[in-house]
Image: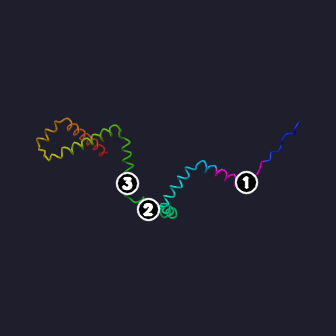
C-alpha cells in the first residue's frame, strides 16, 4: 500500500513563464476579437486624422485647469439659478398628472393651429362678437379653465 501524502508541493511559476502565459492569453483574445479590434483601430485612426486625439490629450494634460474653469463657471449665480429653477420645475412637473399634461399640450397645439388659420383672415373683433363668443362652448370652457387656473394660482401665491 502507498504511503499517505503529507506534503503538497505547489509549482512556483517563474516570471518568464507568467509572461509567456499572459502573451498566449492575449494572442487568443486578439484572434477571437479580430473584427472588433480592426473596427476600434479604424475609429482611432479616423479620430487621430481629425485631430480629436490631440485635443483629448491636451485636455487630459490640462485637466486641473479645465476643472478649475468648469467649477468657476458652474458656481456663478446665473448657473446656480438655472439649476435651482430646473429642479423646482422638475418638482412641479412630477406633481402634475401626466394625463392632464398630455391633454393640455394637445389642446394648446390644436388651439395654435386654429389661431394661425383664423388669424390669416385679417378681420377685427368687435365688442358684440366678443360677447357672442362667450356663448361658444369651446371658448367658454377655455375661459372657465383659465379663471380656475388663475384662482388656484392666486391661492398658491397667497401662502
Nearer the camera: disc 1 or disc 3: 1
Secondary structure state at the residue bearing disc 3: helix
Q: Nearer the viewer, residue 148 or 69?
A: 69
| Residue indicated by mark 2 | 72
Residue at the (36%, 39%) spot, across then down: 98
Label 3 neighbour load within 10 Å: few <14, some 14-19, many 20+: few
Label 1 neighbour load within 10 Å: few <14, some 14-19, many 20+: few
Sequence-first tag of 3 and 2: 2
Residue 78: x %, y % from top left: 37, 58
Rounded to the nearest angstrom, the CA distance separating label 1 from label 3 is 60 Å
- Magenta-drawn segment: 10-27
Relative placement, left or right, of 30 versus 104 is right
Quarter of the image holding residue 16?
Answer: bottom right
| Residue indicated by mark 1 | 17
Specify the quadrant that holds the N terminus. top right
Secondary structure state at the residue bearing disc 2: helix
Secondary structure mostly seen in the magenta stretch:
helix
Rounded to the nearest angstrom, the CA distance separating label 3 from label 2 is 15 Å
| Residue indicated by mark 3 | 82
Relative placement, left or right, of 105 versus 143 is right
Quarter of the image holding residue 115?
Answer: top left
Sequence-first tag of 1 and 2: 1
Specify the quadrant that holds the C terminus. top left
Q: Which mark is residue 62?
A: none
Residue at the (52%, 64%) spot, across then down: 61
Rounded to the nearest angstrom, the CA distance separating label 1 from label 2 is 52 Å
Residue 143: x %, y % from top left: 21, 40
Residue at the (36%, 43%) spot, across then down: 93
Residue at the (17%, 36%) spot, across then down: 136
Residue 76: x %, y % from top left: 40, 60
Amino acid at each position: 500500500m502507498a504511503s499517505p501524502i503529507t506534503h503538497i508541493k505547489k509549482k512556483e511559476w517563474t516570471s518568464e513563464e507568467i509572461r509567456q502565459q499572459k502573451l498566449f492569453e492575449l494572442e487568443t483574445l486578439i484572434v477571437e476579437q479580430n473584427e472588433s479590434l480592426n473596427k476600434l483601430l479604424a475609429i482611432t485612426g479616423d479620430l487621430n486624422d481629425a485631430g480629436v486625439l490631440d485635443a483629448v490629450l491636451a485636455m487630459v494634460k490640462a485637466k486641473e485647469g479645465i476643472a478649475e474653469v468648469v467649477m468657476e463657471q458652474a458656481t456663478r449665480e446665473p448657473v446656480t439659478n438655472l439649476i435651482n429653477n430646473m429642479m423646482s420645475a422638475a418638482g412641479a412637473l412630477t406633481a402634475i398628472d401626466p394625463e392632464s399634461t398630455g391633454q393640455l399640450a394637445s389642446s394648446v397645439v390644436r388651439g395654435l393651429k386654429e389661431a394661425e388659420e383664423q388669424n390669416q383672415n385679417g378681420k377685427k373683433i368687435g365688442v358684440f362678437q366678443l360677447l357672442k363668443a362667450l356663448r361658444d362652448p369651446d371658448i367658454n370652457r377655455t375661459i372657465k379653465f383659465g379663471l380656475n387656473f388663475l384662482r388656484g394660482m392666486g391661492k398658491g401665491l397667497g401662502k
